[in-house]
Image (tube, rainbow, N blue to C red):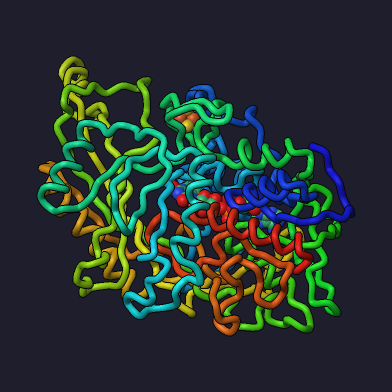
Amino acid sequence: MPQQKNHSFDVIVVGSGASGGWACKLLAEAGLKVALLEAGRPQSDKNFTEHKPEFELEYRNKTTELIRKTRPIQVKFGVCNEYTYDWFVNDLEEPYTTPADKPFNWMGRLRMTGGRTNVWGRVSLRFSDWDFKSASQDGYGEDWPLSYKDIEPYYDLVEKYVGITGSAEGLEHLPDGQFQPPVPLTCQETLFRNRVKEKLGRIVMPTRSANLTKPLNGRGSCHFCGPCERGCVTHSYFNSAFTTVADALASGNCTLISNAMAYKVLMDPERNRARGILYVERNTRHTREIHARAVILCAQSQESVRILLNSATPQYSNGLANSSGVLGHYLTAHVRSGGGSGEFPAFGAKPSLGGPVKPLGIYIARFRNLPNTPSYKKFLRGFGYEGESSTEFNWTAPGFGESYKKALLEPRASLDITGFGEVLPRWDNFVELDPHVKDVYGIPVLKIHMSDGENERAMIQDMGDSAGEMLEAAGAKNIRTYAHPSAPRWALHEAGMARMGVDPQKSVLNQFQQAHDIKNLFVMDASGFTSNPCQNPTLTIMALCVRSCDYLMSELKRNAI
Ligand SMILES: Cc1cc2nc3c(=O)[nH]c(=O)nc-3n(C[C@H](O)[C@H](O)[C@H](O)COP(=O)(O)OP(=O)(O)OC[C@H]3O[C@@H](n4cnc5c(N)ncnc54)[C@H](O)[C@@H]3O)c2cc1C
Ligand code: SF4
């Protein structure tokens, strides 16, 4: 990749994942000179292993203990495995801390072009005004400084480019989008959907997912090989490395600077403007400066907030753009430790070790605290479920020899569902710099304070109970449900900490993710989320980023920043 340093650019974008990819694509295609600083290595189709069987791996993918030596946190989520572990941060080199009584697993920290979109689960759902204006509905927290109609055209634009498979359901609280044809449900999923609708009135649908069912912009449709999190040579799921970032580079206006760990935003204190970024070259440990007219942080929410906290100046002594004092606070992340599973008839399906694998299953739309329904007494807001079905060999069949072989072939069809619940934004869920710990690049690290409150605990319990209720309604056998407290707390959908708002005394960013305090500084990842509804965040991260880039370009054009 061409590398360019100490140059002046129009815009610096930090991070090449879901948000950074879009920012680069839009700005570079519009003719602006963009520097893309990415802490990780370049990604390439050569790294993709979705068709490689485990027996071709040196350790047959049985290396959890080995990976734990360098990535004790990352390995806790299965997508960090022998195939992909070196895409992830080395937890020992780039640690974070927590209070002893509030453990938090910060997983999914990628160090590759594409960031988390390399390995994400691809579930792509719109928010609605029921989410953007939730504070007005139930009196908790703050409304977002924008409404559904402001973001709707950007959802359309993003969905058409990304390629989202899904079905229109006509739900006010989960708006339909620009869908590619849905992936059909399995027999078990269809039975579950019909019975849950009939008996409980709840809506089960094919997962809305960033997997192509029709070719798009040179990307092939999904051929159902299964492990998207190991890459995809046909580019059939959405990964910013081979979509938005590739487009930005093809424009000739974007320079990707890999292995560049942004440390802080450089300021011109006289003019109260961001001048650029100070970063550390990961391979040489040299520090470099890069300058531009505007700076956009897209490093993933905790990482971007860490950069702002590390950029404190005499004028902004508790973190850059933090005159409100709320920077770092209101960390939210979904709870997902309630759900259940059950067994269903196989309907003639035969188990197979080499057959097609559907990379997505079902989604159950939120059914608590909805428009025009009485509020649910036990908690505020709500949760949805992700689920999938499978038909497996009967591995645990009793017996030996011939009788075991016969019993093994008896198919075991099951369906499991996991709740994803909204976490209320609370002041005391926050991040700060740990004054005693630095990473190997000499950059102070975050201390993360996060725990469940009463609302989350009640919601998790309901996730387990309602899973049981739905599986029973569908006629499942051997139903198992769970509802654990989420300790250690963990998440892959973190948001908040530099929240958007109308009032600069209560928020860090305005509705265009522009710092209230510094006009040429933007944070376009999920840091700006005013709340974190139960729908997965990334579609909204991307749509907001496109909207904010439109605003940034118009402001640059009229020399307003
Ligand atoms: C296993 C997994 C499953 C998920 N499933 C879903 C799902 O189904 N649906 C959904 O909506 N979301 C899902 N997510 C979340 C989704 O991936 C993120 O919301 C999204 O990628 C965030 O986009 P981002 O641009 O903020 O950050 P990222 O995509 O993480 O990109 C950030 C980039 O910034 C770089 N970076 C970090 N710090 C620095 C620095 N200091 N200097 C320079 N570069 C830096 C990183 O290397 C990274 O490449 C999942 C995540 C994971 C890990
Ligand atoms: S299942 Fe589809 S999207 Fe996933 S890796 Fe295979 S072809 Fe690509």
Which quadrant: the C terminus? bottom right
On the picture, is 513 further left or further right than 332?
Answer: right
Q: Is residue 164 above or below residue 421?
A: above
Q: Residue furthest top?
A: 402
Q: Is residue 91 above or below residue 82?
A: below
Q: Residue furthest front?
A: 558
Q: How many marks?
A: 0
* Residue 289 on image: x %, y %: 85, 59
Q: Residue at x 87, y 55 (%)?
A: 8
* Residue 500 on image: x %, y %: 55, 71
Q: Is residue 226 above or below residue 342?
A: above
* Residue 378 on image: x %, y %: 23, 73
On the picture, is 383 further left or further right than 223?
Answer: left
Residue 381 visible somewhere in the drawing: yes
Which quadrant: the N terminus? top right
Which is more toward the observer, 337 or 322?
322
Q: Residue at x 28, y 43 (%)?
A: 205
Q: Residue at x 74, y 50 (%)?
A: 36
Which is more toward the observer, 542 or 453?
542
* Residue 16 on image: x %, y %: 66, 48
Q: Residue furthest right?
A: 6
Q: Residue at x 36, y 75 (%)?
A: 453
On the picture, is 551 further left or further right than 469?
Answer: right
Residue 70 visible somewhere in the drawing: no
